[in-house]
């Protein structure tokens, strides 16, 4: 967790309103979207921390297979879990695969038992919803909808990539999730990042020069995860020197280390499962060195028809790798992706057999 959340007060205030306004408050059902590295997981953790501070039971889950079963286990008393775990029929055989309606009922009963006749409070957070089984999401959503209808104190916050969360929210029998208050995590304002660096580094016992802050703000590019990386590695460089001041040389060293980690933890995972056709499109875009690319120019570079490439463009937008702000142009969503593609162009082309 970062020492502070920058520029996200509106999300936190909305959630707190939901907690304080009681069952039925719209903010108790929330969806958080944002690009990779934009702080979705950190936000879920923070909302969970706030709920715990209000005495709530908090169940944090990732939408990998079996998450409904794991939520059920967290809700049920341990002695009952142990006695029922090896009786598949109790759980509807397998949450998300068979008897979704029965699975929803089982979850609903477990939630109601945890809520103790309306006296308890439960928050369920679900991360990486784009990776989920629609059947499992449906089982959980139906159960939560029914519990809310019973006027019990439950909240549900889920997070994921924007276009893929839309797929879940708009799926058949999941219209209930469209009621979720949408919170999109946009890039941070430079002035907020600058203030955060000054205050956080100062609180650690170091002074920091203005030129060091300037280069750190520029390198962070408004991405919360890069803010964390740049700040940490800059601080580490000064600390290793035994200095009480984070200087320009520390910031420059920190930016290099942060860029390396960002590539490994954000850029590479975003690229690793893309087929060669889509990687070729991205490599053509990367020739513009991070500036918006004309779709016509990309087609010329690939020697392909513009209409033929429209499906590639749509798929990359859906995967939240690129975006289109103006007609006829596309740009990378994640910072430094163009730099990475250009730096590794030869290796990528070899892997693609070109």
Image (cartoon, rainbow, N blue to C red):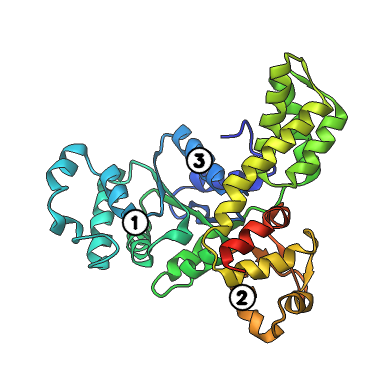
- Res 105 quadrant in image: bottom left
Q: Is the residue marked by circle 1 packed among few (<14), some (14-19), or many (20+) residues within 10 Å?
A: some
Looking at the image, can residue 30 be seen?
Answer: no
Depth check, mark 2 against mark 1: the one in front is 2
Looking at the image, can residue 218 be seen?
Answer: yes
Q: Residue at x 51, y 63 (%)?
A: 165
Residue 244: x and y, percent? 77, 15
CA–CA distance in space, label 1 to label 3: 21 Å
* Label tally: 3
- Per the image, label 3 sits on a secondary structure element best described as helix
Task: Determine which residue is flagged by label 2.
Answer: 312
CA–CA distance in space, label 2 to label 1: 28 Å
Q: Nearer the viewer, residue 98 or 18?
A: 98
Q: Residue at x 51, y 37 (%)?
A: 50
Q: Is the residue marked by circle 3 packed among few (<14), some (14-19), or many (20+) residues within 10 Å?
A: some
Query: Pointers 1 and 3 in contact (CB under 8 A)?
Result: no
**Considering only vertical position in the picture, is 101 above or below 216?**
below
Quarter of the figure that contains the C terminus:
bottom right
Task: Determine which residue is flagged by label 1.
Answer: 65
Seen as rendered, the residue at the extreme right is 211
Q: Is residue 14 left or right of residue 172?
A: right
Q: Earlier in the sequence, mark 2 or mark 1?
A: 1
- Per the image, label 2 sits on a secondary structure element best described as helix
Task: Determine which residue is flagged by label 3.
Answer: 45
Depth check, mark 1 against mark 3: the one in front is 1
| Circle on res. 263 | none
């Amino acid at each position: 967790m970062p020492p502070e959340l920058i520029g996200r007060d509106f999300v936190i205030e909305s959630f707190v309103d939901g907690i304080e306004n009681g069952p039925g408050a719209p903010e108790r059902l929330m969806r958080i979207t944002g690009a990779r590295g934009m702080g979705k997981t950190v936000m879920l953790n923070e909302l969970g921390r706030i709920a715990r501070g209000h005495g709530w039971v908090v169940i944090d889950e990732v939408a990998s297979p079996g998450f409904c079963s794991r939520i059920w286990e967290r809700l049920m008393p341990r002695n009952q879990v142990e006695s029922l775990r090896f009786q598949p029929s109790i759980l509807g055989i397998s949450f998300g695969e068979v008897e979704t309606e029965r699975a929803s009922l089982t979850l609903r009963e477990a939630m109601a038992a945890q809520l103790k006749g309306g006296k308890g409070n439960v928050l369920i957070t679900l991360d990486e919803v784009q990776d989920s089984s629609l059947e499992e999401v449906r089982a959980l959503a139906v159960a939560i909808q029914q519990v809310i209808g019973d006027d019990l104190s439950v909240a549900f916050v889920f997070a994921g990539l924007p276009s893929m969360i839309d797929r879940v929210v708009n799926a058949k029998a999941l219209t209930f999730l469209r009621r979720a208050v949408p919170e999109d995590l946009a890039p941070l304002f430079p002035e907020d990042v600058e203030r955060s660096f000054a205050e956080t580094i100062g609180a650690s016992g170091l002074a920091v020069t203005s030129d060091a802050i300037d280069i750190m703000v520029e390198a962070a590019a408004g991405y919360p995860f890069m803010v964390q990386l740049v700040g940490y590695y800059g601080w580490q460089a000064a600390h290793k020197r035994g200095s009480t001041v984070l200087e320009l040389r520390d910031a420059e060293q920190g930016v290099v280390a942060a860029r390396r980690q960002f590539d490994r933890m954000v850029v590479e995972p975003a690229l690793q499962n893309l087929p060669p056709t889509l990687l070729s499109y991205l490599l053509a875009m990367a020739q513009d060195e991070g500036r918006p690319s004309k779709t016509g120019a990309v087609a010329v570079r690939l020697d392909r028809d513009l209409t033929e490439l429209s499906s590639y463009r749509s798929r990359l937008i859906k995967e939240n790798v690129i975006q289109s702000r103006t007609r006829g142009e596309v740009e990378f969503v994640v910072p430094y992706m163009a730099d990475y593609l250009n730096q590794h162009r030869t290796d990528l082309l070899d892997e693609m057999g070109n």
